[in-house]
Amino acid sequence: MEPLKKEIIRCILTDKLEQASKIIDQSPQLEQLASLLDKTPRNHAPLAGWNSPLPKFITTSVSYTCGIGCEMCNAGFADKTSLFEDYKHLTREEFEALSPWIENATHVALVGLGETLDSPHLEYFLEKLKDKITFISTSGVPLNKKIMEKLIQAQLHYLNLSFDGKTTAGHGGGRDSYINKFWEKVGLIQKTKQTLNVSHPILHLTVAVDSENINQLDEIINSAKSRGILSVDLIYMVPNNQTLYEKSVFTDLKNFRQKLNPVMDKWNGAGMHVRFYEKAQVDHSPEACYFVDKHLMFNLNRQKPDLCCGSLDMPLEINGLTPEEYWNSFPFRYFRSLHFSAVREDLPEICQNCWVLQPERFKDSFQNEKPADCMKWYREAGQFKLANQTEEAEPLYKKIIRVSRNPELVGKAWFHLGELSLKNNRQDEALERMKKAVQFCYDHALAFAFLALLMRCTIDTETSGRHRKPEQEFLEFFKPANITKMEATTPSL
Protein backbone atom coordinates (compact mmCIF):
# COMPACT_ATOMS: atom_id res chain seq x y z
CA MET A 1 0.00 0.00 0.00
CA GLU A 2 1.36 3.41 -0.96
CA PRO A 3 2.52 5.62 1.99
CA LEU A 4 -0.10 8.37 1.51
CA LYS A 5 -2.98 5.91 1.36
CA LYS A 6 -1.64 4.14 4.44
CA GLU A 7 -1.37 7.45 6.33
CA ILE A 8 -4.96 8.45 5.48
CA ILE A 9 -6.30 5.12 6.71
CA ARG A 10 -4.14 5.35 9.81
CA CYS A 11 -5.59 8.78 10.64
CA ILE A 12 -9.14 7.44 10.31
CA LEU A 13 -8.45 4.37 12.44
CA THR A 14 -6.93 6.52 15.20
CA ASP A 15 -9.86 8.99 15.17
CA LYS A 16 -7.88 11.84 13.57
CA LEU A 17 -10.53 12.69 10.99
CA GLU A 18 -9.55 16.32 10.53
CA GLN A 19 -6.00 15.29 9.76
CA ALA A 20 -7.28 12.71 7.27
CA SER A 21 -9.48 15.35 5.60
CA LYS A 22 -6.47 17.57 4.92
CA ILE A 23 -4.62 14.96 2.88
CA ILE A 24 -7.25 12.62 1.43
CA ASP A 25 -7.79 14.74 -1.70
CA GLN A 26 -4.20 13.94 -2.67
CA SER A 27 -5.18 10.29 -3.20
CA PRO A 28 -7.58 9.93 -6.17
CA GLN A 29 -7.88 6.19 -5.45
CA LEU A 30 -9.75 7.00 -2.25
CA GLU A 31 -12.45 9.16 -3.83
CA GLN A 32 -15.29 7.09 -2.37
CA LEU A 33 -13.70 7.11 1.10
CA ALA A 34 -13.20 10.89 0.79
CA SER A 35 -16.88 11.36 -0.03
CA LEU A 36 -17.91 9.36 3.03
CA LEU A 37 -15.39 11.17 5.23
CA ASP A 38 -16.81 14.52 4.15
CA LYS A 39 -20.27 13.46 5.39
CA THR A 40 -19.09 11.79 8.62
CA PRO A 41 -19.93 13.38 12.01
CA ARG A 42 -16.90 14.33 14.12
CA ASN A 43 -18.65 14.51 17.49
CA HIS A 44 -18.10 10.96 18.72
CA ALA A 45 -15.70 8.10 18.10
CA PRO A 46 -17.29 4.71 17.42
CA LEU A 47 -17.12 2.24 20.31
CA ALA A 48 -15.38 4.78 22.54
CA GLY A 49 -16.61 2.82 25.54
CA TRP A 50 -14.28 0.00 24.53
CA ASN A 51 -11.04 1.81 25.29
CA SER A 52 -8.91 -0.33 27.55
CA PRO A 53 -5.88 0.06 29.85
CA LEU A 54 -2.59 -0.90 28.24
CA PRO A 55 -1.67 -4.60 28.45
CA LYS A 56 0.11 -5.69 31.61
CA PHE A 57 1.78 -8.67 29.97
CA ILE A 58 4.30 -8.16 27.15
CA THR A 59 6.11 -10.97 25.36
CA THR A 60 9.01 -10.50 23.00
CA SER A 61 10.94 -13.02 20.97
CA VAL A 62 14.71 -12.63 21.36
CA SER A 63 16.25 -15.53 19.44
CA TYR A 64 15.75 -16.97 15.97
CA THR A 65 17.93 -20.08 16.24
CA CYS A 66 17.23 -23.52 17.71
CA GLY A 67 18.96 -26.87 17.31
CA ILE A 68 16.41 -29.28 18.77
CA GLY A 69 14.30 -29.86 15.66
CA CYS A 70 10.90 -30.56 17.23
CA GLU A 71 8.41 -31.97 14.75
CA MET A 72 5.61 -29.85 16.24
CA CYS A 73 7.50 -26.55 15.92
CA ASN A 74 5.28 -23.88 14.36
CA ALA A 75 8.13 -21.37 14.11
CA GLY A 76 9.96 -23.24 11.35
CA PHE A 77 12.69 -25.11 13.25
CA ALA A 78 11.43 -28.63 12.55
CA ASP A 79 13.93 -28.93 9.70
CA LYS A 80 16.35 -26.04 10.24
CA THR A 81 18.43 -24.48 12.99
CA SER A 82 18.11 -20.83 11.96
CA LEU A 83 15.30 -18.81 10.41
CA PHE A 84 17.66 -16.34 8.72
CA GLU A 85 21.28 -16.37 7.61
CA ASP A 86 22.08 -12.86 8.84
CA TYR A 87 19.62 -12.31 11.69
CA LYS A 88 20.02 -14.57 14.71
CA HIS A 89 18.94 -12.52 17.72
CA LEU A 90 16.94 -9.49 18.79
CA THR A 91 19.33 -6.55 19.08
CA ARG A 92 19.60 -4.25 22.07
CA GLU A 93 18.29 -1.38 19.94
CA GLU A 94 15.22 -3.39 18.91
CA PHE A 95 14.56 -4.20 22.54
CA GLU A 96 14.90 -0.55 23.54
CA ALA A 97 12.23 0.33 20.98
CA LEU A 98 9.76 -1.62 23.12
CA SER A 99 10.33 0.67 26.12
CA PRO A 100 7.02 2.56 25.81
CA TRP A 101 5.12 -0.74 25.96
CA ILE A 102 7.27 -2.27 28.68
CA GLU A 103 6.95 0.85 30.82
CA ASN A 104 3.25 0.15 31.35
CA ALA A 105 3.60 -3.62 31.80
CA THR A 106 3.94 -5.54 35.05
CA HIS A 107 5.02 -8.86 33.47
CA VAL A 108 7.50 -9.35 30.62
CA ALA A 109 8.40 -12.68 29.05
CA LEU A 110 11.47 -13.34 26.90
CA VAL A 111 10.83 -16.23 24.52
CA GLY A 112 12.13 -17.80 21.25
CA LEU A 113 10.85 -18.00 18.42
CA GLY A 114 13.78 -20.37 18.77
CA GLU A 115 15.81 -21.20 21.86
CA THR A 116 15.67 -18.16 24.14
CA LEU A 117 18.99 -18.92 25.81
CA ASP A 118 20.76 -18.58 22.45
CA SER A 119 20.41 -14.80 22.79
CA PRO A 120 23.68 -13.13 23.87
CA HIS A 121 21.80 -10.18 25.38
CA LEU A 122 19.68 -11.79 28.11
CA GLU A 123 21.56 -10.18 30.99
CA TYR A 124 21.18 -6.76 29.36
CA PHE A 125 17.45 -7.33 28.80
CA LEU A 126 16.91 -8.48 32.38
CA GLU A 127 18.80 -5.47 33.72
CA LYS A 128 16.39 -3.22 31.80
CA LEU A 129 13.48 -5.20 33.26
CA LYS A 130 14.60 -5.17 36.89
CA ASP A 131 11.38 -3.49 38.06
CA LYS A 132 9.19 -6.01 36.18
CA ILE A 133 8.17 -9.60 36.86
CA THR A 134 10.30 -11.48 34.37
CA PHE A 135 10.03 -14.83 32.60
CA ILE A 136 12.34 -16.74 30.33
CA SER A 137 11.04 -19.73 28.38
CA THR A 138 13.52 -22.42 27.36
CA SER A 139 13.81 -26.06 26.41
CA GLY A 140 16.51 -26.27 29.07
CA VAL A 141 18.97 -27.87 26.65
CA PRO A 142 21.64 -25.09 26.77
CA LEU A 143 21.45 -24.70 30.55
CA ASN A 144 24.57 -25.24 32.61
CA LYS A 145 25.81 -24.00 35.98
CA LYS A 146 27.40 -20.84 34.54
CA ILE A 147 24.25 -19.79 32.65
CA MET A 148 22.13 -20.53 35.70
CA GLU A 149 24.33 -18.37 37.93
CA LYS A 150 24.04 -15.50 35.45
CA LEU A 151 20.24 -15.75 35.43
CA ILE A 152 20.22 -15.75 39.22
CA GLN A 153 22.47 -12.72 39.37
CA ALA A 154 20.25 -10.96 36.83
CA GLN A 155 17.30 -11.48 39.22
CA LEU A 156 15.14 -13.51 36.82
CA HIS A 157 11.86 -14.32 38.53
CA TYR A 158 10.53 -17.32 36.58
CA LEU A 159 12.19 -19.90 34.37
CA ASN A 160 9.61 -21.66 32.23
CA LEU A 161 10.76 -25.06 30.99
CA SER A 162 9.12 -26.63 27.94
CA PHE A 163 8.92 -30.41 28.23
CA ASP A 164 6.54 -32.89 26.67
CA GLY A 165 7.57 -36.32 27.89
CA LYS A 166 7.52 -39.28 25.57
CA THR A 167 5.99 -37.98 22.35
CA THR A 168 7.57 -38.06 18.92
CA ALA A 169 6.17 -34.62 18.07
CA GLY A 170 7.65 -32.84 21.07
CA HIS A 171 10.99 -31.71 22.46
CA GLY A 172 13.65 -34.34 21.89
CA GLY A 173 11.26 -36.56 19.95
CA GLY A 174 10.38 -38.47 23.12
CA ARG A 175 13.81 -40.09 23.36
CA ASP A 176 14.70 -41.55 26.77
CA SER A 177 18.12 -39.89 26.62
CA TYR A 178 16.51 -36.46 26.15
CA ILE A 179 14.02 -37.05 28.97
CA ASN A 180 16.73 -38.15 31.39
CA LYS A 181 18.92 -35.19 30.44
CA PHE A 182 16.02 -32.80 30.97
CA TRP A 183 15.43 -33.93 34.54
CA GLU A 184 19.18 -33.76 35.17
CA LYS A 185 19.05 -30.10 34.10
CA VAL A 186 16.21 -29.48 36.56
CA GLY A 187 18.34 -31.03 39.29
CA LEU A 188 21.26 -28.80 38.32
CA ILE A 189 19.05 -25.70 38.51
CA GLN A 190 17.74 -26.54 41.96
CA LYS A 191 21.20 -27.49 43.23
CA THR A 192 22.65 -24.19 41.98
CA LYS A 193 19.88 -22.24 43.71
CA GLN A 194 20.46 -24.19 46.91
CA THR A 195 24.21 -23.59 46.79
CA LEU A 196 23.71 -19.85 46.34
CA ASN A 197 20.93 -19.82 48.94
CA VAL A 198 18.41 -18.12 46.66
CA SER A 199 14.75 -18.73 45.90
CA HIS A 200 14.76 -17.46 42.34
CA PRO A 201 14.15 -18.15 39.56
CA ILE A 202 11.07 -20.15 40.40
CA LEU A 203 10.64 -23.04 37.99
CA HIS A 204 7.51 -23.48 35.91
CA LEU A 205 6.71 -26.28 33.47
CA THR A 206 4.80 -26.08 30.19
CA VAL A 207 3.64 -29.31 28.54
CA ALA A 208 2.23 -29.48 25.01
CA VAL A 209 -0.36 -32.24 25.20
CA ASP A 210 -1.00 -34.64 22.31
CA SER A 211 -2.40 -38.14 21.87
CA GLU A 212 0.99 -39.73 22.61
CA ASN A 213 1.70 -38.12 25.97
CA ILE A 214 -1.76 -37.58 27.42
CA ASN A 215 -1.51 -40.79 29.44
CA GLN A 216 1.85 -39.66 30.87
CA LEU A 217 0.67 -36.39 32.39
CA ASP A 218 0.25 -37.83 35.85
CA GLU A 219 3.83 -39.10 35.75
CA ILE A 220 5.20 -35.84 34.33
CA ILE A 221 3.50 -33.68 36.97
CA ASN A 222 4.60 -36.05 39.73
CA SER A 223 8.19 -35.83 38.48
CA ALA A 224 7.95 -32.04 38.41
CA LYS A 225 6.59 -31.82 41.94
CA SER A 226 9.22 -34.16 43.32
CA ARG A 227 11.86 -31.80 41.90
CA GLY A 228 10.37 -28.62 43.31
CA ILE A 229 8.34 -27.47 40.30
CA LEU A 230 4.95 -26.55 41.70
CA SER A 231 3.21 -24.92 38.73
CA VAL A 232 2.42 -26.50 35.37
CA ASP A 233 0.72 -25.15 32.26
CA LEU A 234 -0.87 -27.70 29.96
CA ILE A 235 -1.42 -26.50 26.40
CA TYR A 236 -2.51 -28.00 23.10
CA MET A 237 0.09 -29.35 20.72
CA VAL A 238 -1.23 -27.28 17.83
CA PRO A 239 -0.78 -29.13 14.52
CA ASN A 240 0.28 -27.37 11.34
CA ASN A 241 -0.03 -30.34 8.98
CA GLN A 242 -2.03 -33.53 8.56
CA THR A 243 0.59 -35.78 10.19
CA LEU A 244 0.67 -33.68 13.35
CA TYR A 245 -3.12 -33.45 13.34
CA GLU A 246 -3.29 -37.24 13.57
CA LYS A 247 -1.02 -37.06 16.63
CA SER A 248 -2.99 -34.24 18.25
CA VAL A 249 -5.88 -34.42 20.70
CA PHE A 250 -8.15 -32.64 18.22
CA THR A 251 -9.05 -35.99 16.66
CA ASP A 252 -10.95 -36.91 19.86
CA LEU A 253 -11.56 -33.93 22.12
CA LYS A 254 -14.10 -35.75 24.27
CA ASN A 255 -11.52 -38.37 25.20
CA PHE A 256 -8.96 -35.60 25.79
CA ARG A 257 -11.20 -33.82 28.29
CA GLN A 258 -12.13 -37.05 30.05
CA LYS A 259 -8.47 -37.82 30.61
CA LEU A 260 -7.14 -34.36 31.36
CA ASN A 261 -9.67 -33.07 33.88
CA PRO A 262 -9.16 -35.85 36.49
CA VAL A 263 -5.39 -35.32 36.33
CA MET A 264 -5.79 -31.59 36.90
CA ASP A 265 -8.24 -32.19 39.76
CA LYS A 266 -5.81 -34.59 41.43
CA TRP A 267 -2.78 -32.34 41.35
CA ASN A 268 -4.57 -29.09 42.09
CA GLY A 269 -6.02 -30.86 45.10
CA ALA A 270 -2.50 -31.84 46.10
CA GLY A 271 -1.34 -28.23 46.23
CA MET A 272 0.01 -27.90 42.70
CA HIS A 273 -1.02 -25.07 40.38
CA VAL A 274 -2.00 -26.91 37.19
CA ARG A 275 -3.82 -24.95 34.52
CA PHE A 276 -5.03 -25.33 30.96
CA TYR A 277 -5.06 -21.81 29.49
CA GLU A 278 -5.70 -20.37 32.96
CA LYS A 279 -8.50 -22.85 33.66
CA ALA A 280 -8.49 -25.55 36.34
CA GLN A 281 -10.78 -27.56 34.06
CA VAL A 282 -10.89 -27.97 30.30
CA ASP A 283 -13.95 -26.22 28.90
CA HIS A 284 -15.95 -27.69 26.03
CA SER A 285 -15.96 -24.23 24.48
CA PRO A 286 -14.49 -21.33 26.52
CA GLU A 287 -16.72 -18.33 27.13
CA ALA A 288 -13.98 -15.91 26.15
CA CYS A 289 -10.59 -16.15 24.50
CA TYR A 290 -7.63 -16.67 26.81
CA PHE A 291 -5.54 -14.02 25.04
CA VAL A 292 -7.90 -11.12 24.36
CA ASP A 293 -7.11 -7.69 25.77
CA LYS A 294 -4.35 -8.51 28.24
CA HIS A 295 -1.35 -9.75 26.28
CA LEU A 296 0.71 -8.40 23.40
CA MET A 297 3.44 -10.40 21.66
CA PHE A 298 6.25 -8.85 19.64
CA ASN A 299 7.67 -11.30 17.13
CA LEU A 300 9.34 -10.77 13.75
CA ASN A 301 7.06 -7.99 12.49
CA ARG A 302 7.52 -5.66 15.40
CA GLN A 303 5.30 -3.00 13.83
CA LYS A 304 2.38 -5.45 13.99
CA PRO A 305 2.49 -7.26 17.33
CA ASP A 306 0.37 -10.37 17.81
CA LEU A 307 -2.70 -10.37 20.03
CA CYS A 308 -2.65 -14.14 20.36
CA CYS A 309 -0.85 -17.32 19.31
CA GLY A 310 -3.23 -17.77 16.39
CA SER A 311 -3.09 -16.34 12.88
CA LEU A 312 -5.08 -13.15 13.53
CA ASP A 313 -3.43 -10.14 11.92
CA MET A 314 -4.33 -6.54 12.74
CA PRO A 315 -4.83 -3.94 9.97
CA LEU A 316 -2.75 -1.22 11.61
CA GLU A 317 0.99 -0.86 12.17
CA ILE A 318 2.52 0.96 15.14
CA ASN A 319 4.95 3.13 13.11
CA GLY A 320 5.31 6.00 15.57
CA LEU A 321 1.95 5.69 17.30
CA THR A 322 2.04 5.84 21.08
CA PRO A 323 0.97 2.66 22.89
CA GLU A 324 -2.30 4.36 23.87
CA GLU A 325 -3.06 5.39 20.28
CA TYR A 326 -2.33 1.95 18.91
CA TRP A 327 -3.94 -0.15 21.66
CA ASN A 328 -7.14 1.89 21.58
CA SER A 329 -7.37 2.45 17.84
CA PHE A 330 -10.67 1.54 16.21
CA PRO A 331 -9.69 -2.03 15.15
CA PHE A 332 -8.78 -2.88 18.75
CA ARG A 333 -11.98 -1.35 20.14
CA TYR A 334 -14.00 -3.25 17.57
CA PHE A 335 -12.17 -6.48 18.43
CA ARG A 336 -12.97 -6.07 22.13
CA SER A 337 -16.61 -5.31 21.46
CA LEU A 338 -16.92 -8.50 19.42
CA HIS A 339 -15.26 -10.72 21.99
CA PHE A 340 -16.83 -9.27 25.10
CA SER A 341 -20.37 -8.36 24.02
CA ALA A 342 -21.27 -9.69 20.58
CA VAL A 343 -22.63 -13.13 19.76
CA ARG A 344 -20.02 -15.69 18.75
CA GLU A 345 -21.24 -15.76 15.14
CA ASP A 346 -20.04 -12.15 14.73
CA LEU A 347 -16.45 -12.87 15.77
CA PRO A 348 -13.67 -12.73 13.18
CA GLU A 349 -13.73 -15.88 11.09
CA ILE A 350 -10.25 -16.77 12.34
CA CYS A 351 -11.52 -16.69 15.94
CA GLN A 352 -14.59 -18.76 15.09
CA ASN A 353 -12.32 -21.59 13.94
CA CYS A 354 -9.55 -21.12 16.48
CA TRP A 355 -8.11 -23.95 18.55
CA VAL A 356 -8.52 -21.90 21.75
CA LEU A 357 -12.07 -20.65 21.38
CA GLN A 358 -13.57 -23.28 19.09
CA PRO A 359 -11.48 -26.47 19.34
CA GLU A 360 -14.34 -28.57 17.95
CA ARG A 361 -14.22 -26.59 14.69
CA PHE A 362 -10.44 -26.44 14.43
CA LYS A 363 -10.37 -29.91 12.87
CA ASP A 364 -12.13 -28.49 9.81
CA SER A 365 -8.76 -26.98 8.87
CA PHE A 366 -7.54 -30.48 8.05
CA GLN A 367 -10.42 -31.72 5.94
CA ASN A 368 -8.43 -32.08 2.69
CA GLU A 369 -11.29 -30.59 0.68
CA LYS A 370 -10.09 -29.17 -2.62
CA PRO A 371 -11.02 -25.47 -2.61
CA ALA A 372 -13.01 -24.07 -5.49
CA ASP A 373 -11.07 -21.81 -7.83
CA CYS A 374 -12.96 -18.53 -7.54
CA MET A 375 -10.29 -16.18 -8.85
CA LYS A 376 -11.77 -16.19 -12.35
CA TRP A 377 -15.08 -14.91 -10.95
CA TYR A 378 -13.24 -12.39 -8.76
CA ARG A 379 -11.37 -10.93 -11.74
CA GLU A 380 -14.53 -10.80 -13.84
CA ALA A 381 -16.44 -9.07 -11.04
CA GLY A 382 -13.63 -6.53 -10.72
CA GLN A 383 -13.82 -5.71 -14.42
CA PHE A 384 -17.59 -5.24 -14.21
CA LYS A 385 -17.17 -3.02 -11.14
CA LEU A 386 -14.63 -0.80 -12.90
CA ALA A 387 -17.04 -0.46 -15.80
CA ASN A 388 -19.84 0.56 -13.40
CA GLN A 389 -21.79 -2.57 -14.32
CA THR A 390 -23.13 -3.21 -10.83
CA GLU A 391 -25.81 -5.68 -11.89
CA GLU A 392 -23.14 -7.94 -13.40
CA ALA A 393 -20.54 -7.51 -10.63
CA GLU A 394 -22.74 -8.06 -7.59
CA PRO A 395 -23.92 -11.63 -8.42
CA LEU A 396 -20.33 -12.74 -9.01
CA TYR A 397 -19.16 -11.39 -5.64
CA LYS A 398 -22.10 -13.12 -3.96
CA LYS A 399 -21.23 -16.37 -5.75
CA ILE A 400 -17.68 -16.18 -4.39
CA ILE A 401 -19.06 -15.70 -0.87
CA ARG A 402 -21.25 -18.79 -1.24
CA VAL A 403 -18.64 -21.06 -2.79
CA SER A 404 -15.15 -20.03 -1.70
CA ARG A 405 -13.46 -21.54 1.35
CA ASN A 406 -10.76 -18.86 1.23
CA PRO A 407 -11.60 -16.39 4.05
CA GLU A 408 -9.41 -13.63 2.58
CA LEU A 409 -11.14 -13.85 -0.79
CA VAL A 410 -14.56 -13.91 0.87
CA GLY A 411 -13.63 -10.82 2.88
CA LYS A 412 -12.53 -8.99 -0.24
CA ALA A 413 -15.77 -9.92 -2.00
CA TRP A 414 -17.77 -8.48 0.91
CA PHE A 415 -15.63 -5.33 0.75
CA HIS A 416 -16.41 -4.75 -2.92
CA LEU A 417 -20.10 -5.36 -2.23
CA GLY A 418 -19.86 -2.72 0.50
CA GLU A 419 -18.40 -0.24 -1.95
CA LEU A 420 -21.22 -0.98 -4.40
CA SER A 421 -23.76 -0.35 -1.62
CA LEU A 422 -22.19 3.03 -0.87
CA LYS A 423 -22.17 3.93 -4.52
CA ASN A 424 -25.92 3.33 -4.60
CA ASN A 425 -26.50 5.27 -1.36
CA ARG A 426 -27.43 2.16 0.64
CA GLN A 427 -25.50 3.14 3.76
CA ASP A 428 -27.02 0.66 6.22
CA GLU A 429 -26.35 -2.17 3.79
CA ALA A 430 -22.79 -0.91 3.29
CA LEU A 431 -22.26 -0.99 7.05
CA GLU A 432 -23.29 -4.64 7.31
CA ARG A 433 -21.18 -5.59 4.32
CA MET A 434 -18.07 -3.87 5.69
CA LYS A 435 -18.59 -5.72 8.96
CA LYS A 436 -18.57 -8.94 6.97
CA ALA A 437 -15.46 -7.81 5.09
CA VAL A 438 -13.40 -7.42 8.26
CA GLN A 439 -14.95 -10.53 9.79
CA PHE A 440 -13.41 -12.65 7.04
CA CYS A 441 -10.33 -10.51 6.41
CA TYR A 442 -9.47 -8.78 9.68
CA ASP A 443 -6.33 -7.12 8.34
CA HIS A 444 -8.21 -5.35 5.51
CA ALA A 445 -7.22 -1.79 6.43
CA LEU A 446 -9.39 -0.01 3.86
CA ALA A 447 -12.47 -2.00 4.86
CA PHE A 448 -11.81 -0.96 8.45
CA ALA A 449 -11.55 2.69 7.42
CA PHE A 450 -14.97 2.50 5.74
CA LEU A 451 -16.39 0.64 8.75
CA ALA A 452 -15.07 3.24 11.21
CA LEU A 453 -16.73 6.07 9.28
CA LEU A 454 -19.98 4.18 8.72
CA MET A 455 -20.27 3.42 12.42
CA ARG A 456 -19.90 7.12 13.20
CA CYS A 457 -22.89 7.71 10.92
CA THR A 458 -25.02 4.99 12.54
CA ILE A 459 -25.49 5.70 16.23
CA ASP A 460 -27.66 2.61 16.76
CA THR A 461 -24.64 0.35 16.25
CA GLU A 462 -22.83 1.76 19.27
CA THR A 463 -22.21 -0.65 22.14
CA SER A 464 -21.51 1.29 25.29
CA GLY A 465 -20.10 -1.06 27.89
CA ARG A 466 -18.33 -4.28 28.68
CA HIS A 467 -20.39 -7.40 29.29
CA ARG A 468 -17.30 -9.52 30.01
CA LYS A 469 -13.73 -8.73 30.95
CA PRO A 470 -10.48 -10.61 30.39
CA GLU A 471 -9.51 -13.00 33.14
CA GLN A 472 -6.31 -12.13 34.99
CA GLU A 473 -5.63 -15.39 36.81
CA PHE A 474 -2.19 -15.69 35.24
CA LEU A 475 -1.09 -12.24 36.39
CA GLU A 476 -2.56 -12.80 39.83
CA PHE A 477 -0.63 -16.03 40.36
CA PHE A 478 2.71 -14.87 38.99
CA LYS A 479 3.28 -11.86 41.19
CA PRO A 480 5.85 -10.64 43.76
CA ALA A 481 3.95 -12.11 46.70
CA ASN A 482 4.82 -15.54 45.33
CA ILE A 483 8.54 -14.73 45.14
CA THR A 484 10.56 -14.89 48.33
CA LYS A 485 13.49 -12.54 48.66
CA MET A 486 17.05 -13.77 48.33
CA GLU A 487 18.31 -15.20 51.57
CA ALA A 488 21.84 -14.07 50.77
CA THR A 489 23.59 -11.80 48.34
CA THR A 490 24.64 -13.61 45.20
CA PRO A 491 28.43 -13.47 44.83
CA SER A 492 29.88 -11.54 41.91
CA LEU A 493 30.57 -13.64 38.84
Image (cartoon, helix red, strand yellow):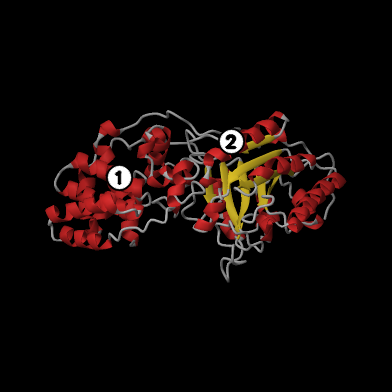
Mark 1 lies on a secondary structure that is: helix
Front position in the image: 262 or 304 = 262
The residue under the point 46% across, 48% down is 363
Farthest residue, direction bottom: 85
Give the Cα distance between marks 1 and 2.
37 Å
Query: Could you say which quadrant of the image residue 171 lies in?
Result: bottom right
Whether residue 130 is visible: yes
Instruction: Give the side of residue 190 with respect to residue 44, left or right.
Output: right
Q: Which residue is mark 1?
A: 436
Q: Position of residue 369 (x, y in %)?
A: 38, 56
Give the residue pinned by disc 2.
258
- Name which residue lies at 26% across and 49% down: 402
Front residue of this view, candidates 373 and 234: 373
Front-most of 301 and 224?
A: 224
Residue 398 position, x and y percent, is 22, 50
Callout 2, which amino acid? Gln
